[in-house]
Image (spheres, grey):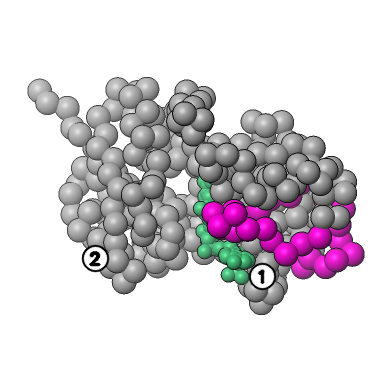
């Protein structure tokens, strides 16, 4: 008897840089699951056709979704998890019979990685830089992990204000808009794409005065510009987004197969690739 080869994929544009196939291959191997996980490029207006075509095959268990399709995925699925509904963004699609559920595992990935690095969130004051899909996805998990406040800064103030309002609907009075008087932070999370261009957010170095733990969702072959800057100005610890990537993938895998993979080996492997 031949065993089934399950299929999953990641949709994005661009997508050739995605490490998801190598991560999911490592997870599938742990459980002896035969999984064909591919990268799927879609044109900016081509997500719906692409996702429909992919799921024509009943062996397709699910998909990951990355930039710029997380909002399209939110509209495409039949129902949303509470995390995805709050984020307004889906990074994981799960097939349930003939229906599709959208979830968002980015917040789980971030909080799990912070915890792995022994960063305490309970009753801590957090500065969140950015108000895009990743920032939105992170907030419910950060609030659930017990942060006492979330101060939000973003280049586009209207988006930051909208995120403050949404967050306060999730938990009353937990969120506020950054202003130059609010500089006492225990944890700072950069959820912008600025580090991809080697750029820094337009914030004073006083945000590092209280020696916060500093996280950048971006990961590169070397510490990001933001992490170097943070270390120079007082950060107690600096962490990039590689672990978040691995943990959000582990949660997606669990949602598809009901099995929680070990993450250390693939994390160390990806880290060693970055160093080689
Ligand atoms: P979005 O495009 O939804 O949001 C981008 C954010 O970056 C916005 O807040 C935007 O501000 C800000 N930004 C972009 N360019 C500039 C600039 N020149 N100056 C100031 N602000 C800028 O992206 P996502 O939220 O989905 O992703 C953000 C980053 O997080 C990406 O680099 C992505 O790779 C990374 N990420 C990492 C993950 C991981 O697992 N490690 C998971 C998810 C995301 P504005 O609103 O003003 O445009």
* Residue 152 magenta-highlighted: no
- Report which quarter residue 71 is drawn in: bottom left
Give me the residue at 61% from left, 37% from top. 113
* Residue 188 magenta-highlighted: yes
Q: Which residue is mark 1?
A: 155
Say how many tags the image has.
Answer: 2
Residue 155, given in percent of the width and then of the height, sits at 66, 70
Question: As drawn, is 182 to the left or to the right of 68?
Answer: right
State which image quarter holds ligand 1. Answer: bottom right
228 or 21: nearer the eye? 228
Residue 36, given in percent of the width and then of the height, sits at 24, 37
Q: Which residue is mark 2?
A: 49
Rendered view: 32 above or below 13: above
Task: For residue 76, say whether it is visible.
Answer: yes
> Earlier along the polypeptide chain: callout 2 or callout 1?
2
- Report which quarter residue 170 is drawn in: bottom right
229 or 207: nearer the eye? 229
Q: CA gap, disc 2 to disc 1?
A: 33 Å
Task: For residue 107, say whether it is visible.
Answer: no
Give me the residue at 71% from left, 31% from top. 118
Report the predominant secondary structure element of the magenta stretch: loop
256 or 125: nearer the eye? 125
Give me the residue at 29% from left, 40% from top. 37
Residue 224, given in percent of the width and then of the height, sits at 61, 46
Residue 223, given in percent of the width and then of the height, sits at 62, 41
Rendered view: 147 above or below 260: below
Q: Range of the magenta residues? A: 176-204
């Amino acid at each position: 008897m031949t065993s089934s080869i399950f299929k999953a994929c990641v949709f994005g544009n661009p997508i050739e840089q995605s490490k998801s196939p190598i991560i999911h291959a490592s997870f599938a191997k742990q459980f002896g699951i035969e999984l064909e996980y591919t990268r799927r490029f879609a044109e900016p207006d081509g997500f719906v056709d692409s996702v429909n075509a992919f799921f024509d095959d009943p062996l397709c268990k699910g998909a990951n979704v990355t930039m710029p399709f997380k909002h399209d995925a939110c509209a495409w699925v039949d129902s949303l998890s509470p995390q995805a509904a709050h984020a307004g963004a889906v990074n994981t699609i799960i097939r349930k019979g003939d229906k599709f559920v959208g979830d968002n595992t980015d917040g789980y990935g971030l909080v799990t990685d912070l915890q792995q690095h022994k960063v305490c969130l309970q009753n801590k004051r957090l500065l969140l830089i950015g108000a895009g899909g990743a920032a939105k996805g992170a907030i419910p998990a950060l609030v659930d992990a017990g942060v006492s406040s979330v101060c939000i800064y973003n280049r586009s103030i209207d988006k930051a204000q909208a995120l403050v309002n949404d967050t306060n609907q999730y938990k009353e009075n937990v969120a506020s808009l950054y202003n130059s008087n609010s500089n006492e932070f225990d944890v700072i999370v950069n959820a912008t794409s600025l580090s991809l261009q080697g750029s820094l957010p337009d914030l004073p170095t006083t945000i590092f005065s209280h020696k916060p733990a500093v996280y950048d969702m971006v990961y590169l072959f070397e510490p990001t510009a933001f992490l170097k800057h943070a270390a120079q100005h007082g950060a107690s610890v600096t962490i990039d987004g590689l672990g978040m990537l691995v943990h959000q993938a582990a949660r997606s895998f669990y949602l598809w197969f009901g099995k929680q993979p070990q993450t250390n080996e693939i994390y160390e492997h990806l880290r060693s690739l970055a160093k080689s």
